[in-house]
Image: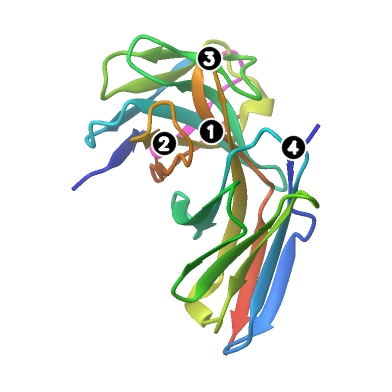
């Protein structure tokens, strides 16, 4: 039972390089999310997708783009990486598309370093 | 402007004692509050939640209390165990036309010593 799978687990980029973080869930969830975690900052929402075909900005969307490829997959793209994007990135999914009490299931994270 | 605040970065308690983790929020439109637990090198996992129309929810050793007038909630762990040592995040849900999303606090690191 995989749950939420993120790839890669670790990545080092040079400033200006681009890359895509991949996320897939096998729980048939409607909603998917990307968060970043920085020391002393908690988890901050980058983008989310309430259902296939829809995406919306979270708290810190600048410098990122997302694609909800299908119901299973939600990718996060850094077009031109900056050192400020060094962080741990978490993908999550939820089985409650628009109601309350969202219980998120998280992946194990991608540790990204931008030099 | 932080909408969910956890003002204590860390908490240390002895095994068997009560752990109380606190959380304050500013947005009265939040309709659900949740606590997540995170171990190093793992993603957060759901612990317990409470609806904004309730003031208490209990699940085994974990109880969450909500004081809406004070915009404050707390997580009580009784008795605390060394395996409870982790980072605890308070979170709140909001709903808009685009869907529902969680806003997290900065987290409190709990250390339970044996």
Q: Which disc is residue A35 wearing? A: 1
For this rendering, which residue is in front, A47 or B92? Answer: B92
Task: Give the Cα separation between the discs numbered 1 and 4.
Answer: 16 Å
Question: Disc number at residue B97?
Answer: 3
In front: label 4 or label 3: 3
Task: Please state which of residues B111 and B23 is positioned toward the viewer in this rendering.
Answer: B23
Report which residue position mark 4 lands on: B3
Q: Quadrant of the C terminus of chain B?
A: bottom right
Image coords of residue B57 (percent x, y): 52, 63
**Alpha carbon distance from label 2 to label 1:** 8 Å
**Which residue occupies 30% across, 38% down?**
A5
Q: Nearer the viewer, mark 1 or mark 4?
A: 4
Task: Name which residue lies at 55% across and 68% down.
Answer: B63
The local secondary structure at tag 1 comes to strand
The residue wearing badge 2 is A92
- Magenta span: A8-16
Q: Residues within 10 Å of mark 4 (few under 14, many from 20)?
A: some
Q: Quadrant of residue B103?
A: top right
Rendering quarter of residue B19 = bottom right
Disc number lying in front (1 or 3): 3
State the separation of the CA atoms marked 1 and 3: 20 Å
């Amino acid at each position: 039972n995989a749950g939420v799978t993120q790839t890669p687990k670790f990545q080092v980029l040079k400033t200006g390089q681009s890359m895509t973080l991949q996320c897939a869930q096998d729980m048939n969830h409607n909603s998917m999310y990307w968060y970043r975690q920085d020391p002393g900052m908690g988890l901050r929402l980058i983008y989310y997708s309430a259902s296939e075909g829809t995406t919306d900005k979270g708290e810190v969307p600048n410098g990122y783009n997302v694609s909800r490829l299908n119901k299973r997959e939600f990718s996060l793209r850094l077009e031109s990486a900056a050192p400020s994007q060094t962080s741990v990135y978490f993908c999550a999914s939820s089985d409650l598309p628009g109601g309350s009490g969202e219980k998120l299931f998280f992946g194990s994270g991608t540790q990204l370093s931008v030099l | 402007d932080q909408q969910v605040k956890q003002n204590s970065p860390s908490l240390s308690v002895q095994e068997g004692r009560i752990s109380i983790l606190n959380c304050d929020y500013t947005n009265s439109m939040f309709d659900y509050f949740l606590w997540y637990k995170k171990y190093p090198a793992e993603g957060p996992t759901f612990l317990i939640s409470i609806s904004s129309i309730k003031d208490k929810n209990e699940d085994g050793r974990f109880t969450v209390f909500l004081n809406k007038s004070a915009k404050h909630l707390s997580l009580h762990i009784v008795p605390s165990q060394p395996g409870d040592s982790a980072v605890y995040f308070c979170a709140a849900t909001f709903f808009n036309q685009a869907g529902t999303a969680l806003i997290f606090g900065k987290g409190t690191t709990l250390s339970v010593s044996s």
